[in-house]
Image (tube, helix red, strand yellow):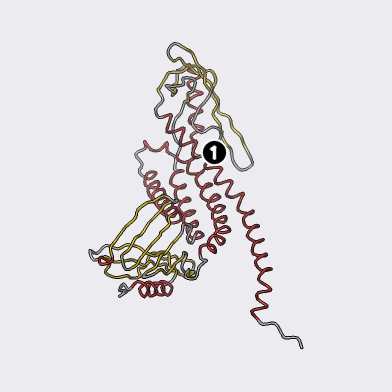
Amino acid sequence: MKRPSSPSTTRGARNPAARTGKRAGGWLLGLFALPFAAVGVGMLLLSVLPTLYDWARVQWWQPVPATLVTARLETSRSSKSSSYTVKASYRYQVAGREYQGDRVAISGGGDNVGDFQEALGARLEQALRDGAPVQVWVSPTDPAQAVIDRSLRPGLLALKMVFVVVFGGVGVGLLVHVLRPARAAQGLVGSNGQPLTAGMPGRVERIPGGVTMYFPAGRWWGLKLALALFGAVFLAVGALVPWEQEASADVAPWLLRLVFGGVGGMVLLGSFYALANSLRVRLDHNGLRTERRLLGLMLQWHQVPGPEIARLRVVESYAVQSNSRREVYFRIVAELRGGRQLTIAQDLKGRAQADKLLASIGGWTGYATR
């Protein structure tokens, strides 16, 4: 008589197919993420960073009078909008030698961000009609390099950063999500390696007389990328206020920049830090050591002897409201006898998970939790 297969045998038979399907889904998600990552990273490496580099180096260039040869504002119209491009050529002299240039601004090409192109085009066309000289900025080490306008254009830069954050953030975040499970599985091999639950984005491992914990970068990446998008939108709104109004007596443009740009910038920087930092902790009878890194580089570390630790406790970090659902995230801190607090666990989703981890750490290390 044939013995029926046990549930564990059936699950074991199905596991290879399930793993194959999951692996195929991961590859598809990775392929979907690649174009987004390419757009964001490409915009950062090929446009944003070169623009910042050019702007920094032209600040040291010298002013030289130049004579315009040509100057015109070109308009490219579509069904929904128009973009403008300023083109000009000019002659100038350095140390008795004549040069000719055609670079107008740091950022080449056309756009319709603010009225920069239109204002610059009108100014150059008027100077050409009047035969008036214009000031250009010339490299002291290579006089053949020159530019008419060396302003940074924060509005255009902020617009590009939206593409970097939104497309690059989504693409890189999805790739991290696809690639991370394999690394996490390798890190948990071992008899005393204990995986954290879904409410604990990291790894905890019991050691003789204590515990080690690691909270990697990319914790709750979806939430933090959403915050980064929120910050980027606010920053863009503030930066897109026409900078030509800065000499105006009206304080409204400056107030709008301060509110939207300031809030957006702080949220964007905060979400970047939250996404890119990692925390490594060792706590035992001898004391506590924490290492905080940002993009893999050591940011700060603390070494505290055991007698200085008064107790361990759970602290609320932040809350996220989504429609009628409110999710609260906690951290565990070590309170020192001088009143200082050091974070030893973070981004713990839900009070129950935080209390459970606190009880385990307290039992393993012997430190007070009340």
Provide residue 340's location: percent of width, then percent of height. Answer: 27, 62
Residue 241 relative to residue 173: left or right? left
Above or below 79: residue 314: below
Please say whether residue 160 is visible from this viewpoint.
yes
Is residue 37 shown above or below 66? below
- The quarter of the image holding the C terminus is bottom left
Identify the residue under disc 1.
46
| Location of residue 176 with respect to 285 vertically, above or below | above
Identify the secondary structure beneath mark 1: helix
Q: Residue furthest left?
A: 338
The residue drawn where x is 64% and y is 53% is 31
Counting from the top left corner in percent of width and height, residue 127 is at 47, 21
Task: Judge left or right: residue 262 versus residue 335.
Answer: right
Residue 58 position within the rendered picture, expressed as x and y whole percent measured from the top left: 43, 29
The image quarter containing residue 83 is: top right
Q: Nearer the viewer, residue 159 or 214?
A: 214
In the image, residue 204 above or below residue 121: below
Give the residue drawn at x 38%, y 56%.
292
| Res 324 visible | no
Which residue is pictured at 40% across the width and 23% down the height? Answer: 62
Q: Which residue sits at x=24%, y=64%?
A: 339
Q: Amino acid at mark 1?
A: Leu
